Image: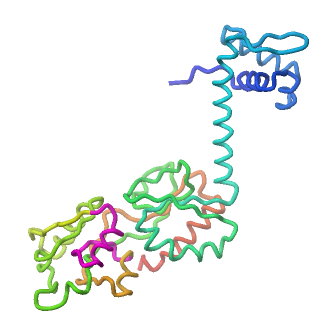
Amino acid sequence: MSRDLPSFTGLRAFEAVARNMSFRAAADELHVSHSAISHHVRALESRLGVRLLNRTTRRVALTDEGARYYPVLKEAFDRMERGTAELLDSRLAGVLTVQVYVTTAMQWLLPRLSRYQALQSDVEVRLSTAFQEWEFNPDGVDVGIVLGEDDDPRLHFRYLYTGKVTPVCSPALTVGERGLHQPADIARFPVIDVYTSPRDWQRWLEAVALGDLAVRITTRYDTYLMAMQAAAAGNGIAMAEEQDAEEEVRAGRLIRPFDIAVPRVRSWYTVCEASRRDEPKIKSFMDWVEAEMAERRT
């Protein structure tokens, strides 16, 4: 449905006159003539069918209708002014807001972010994080690192890689005769699930021909990060994206008990609004992420 609103020019002229209580001051502010301001206000009054201003040779006063209408317009113009300032601050003042999942931020982006900042010292990076996977939302952010599908023509996607998930656990769970040695042994251990990616375990068990194996899920988390931390604490076996677990494996806090991983259903992309794909700060960040993630595609 179309909006039934008067001319923006008339609204702007009336708001300026009412705020300054002067046609001349409003004309100077809007860089138009006194007569133009008067014409725009009269056109607005004609459109509304009410008188908004009482004019005399010495002063301007609001009518009752004008006094009711002016605060509404002032609030609307104030909000537009604030919104414009915030938009310009984000897009033009060297601020880059990145939408990223918490696990990706903690396990991959933050340890590397200083390298990007060394290359782009004039860009201030702000992270917009969430614990659960969600679609890219360009409102208030510039670029995202997301799981998804490149099927939205309003957005520009750059493929990064397709991750793989695999079980991980504390090294202590593999010790001794009753330790975790074969995939079927999983049935004897607590299993940690990531409920935002509910089919990980079933797909992996099917890949090792154990689709009917009964596993004992004891805890469920909303991120791989929490699941990995629980596994490192010895609370059970978790499913994790193998690239996100690399640091924990190198440090010896986690191990991959089986050299079997299954691809994720969706792939990783950097994404931005299609109309902004060539903005220097966005392009430079997407180029950098792609280069940094090159090893994940091998």
| Above or below 213: residue 281 | above
Picture quadrant of residue 71: top right
Q: Position of residue 30 (x, y in %)?
A: 82, 31
The quadrant in which the C terminus is found is: bottom left
Q: Is residue 265 above or below residue 41?
A: below
Q: Residue at x 46, y 68 (%)?
A: 105
Taking the image as shown, residue 96 lies to the left or right of residue 192, namely right
Residue at the bottom extreme?
176
Q: Going 60% across and 54% down the picture, which residue do you hit?
A: 276
Counting labels gives 0
**How is the rendered protein coloured?**
rainbow
| Residue 208 percent coordinates (x, y) | 16, 76
Q: Residue furthest right?
A: 57
Residue located at (26% from left, 60% from top): 195
* The magenta stretch spans residue 45: no
Residue 288's quadrant in the figure?
bottom right
Residue 104 pos. (x, y %): 43, 68
**Which corner quadrant of the image does residue 177 belong to?**
bottom left
Residue 186 lies left or right of residue 17; in this view the side is left
- Left or right: 292 as drawn, with respect to 164: right
| Residue 87 vertical placement versus 277 (above, below) | above
In terms of depth relative to the viewer, which is nearer, 132 or 147?
A: 132
**Magenta run includes residue 239:** yes
Q: Position of residue 221 (x, y in %)?
A: 29, 63
Q: Nearer the viewer, residue 222 or 158?
A: 222
> Which residue range is magenta in the image?
221-243
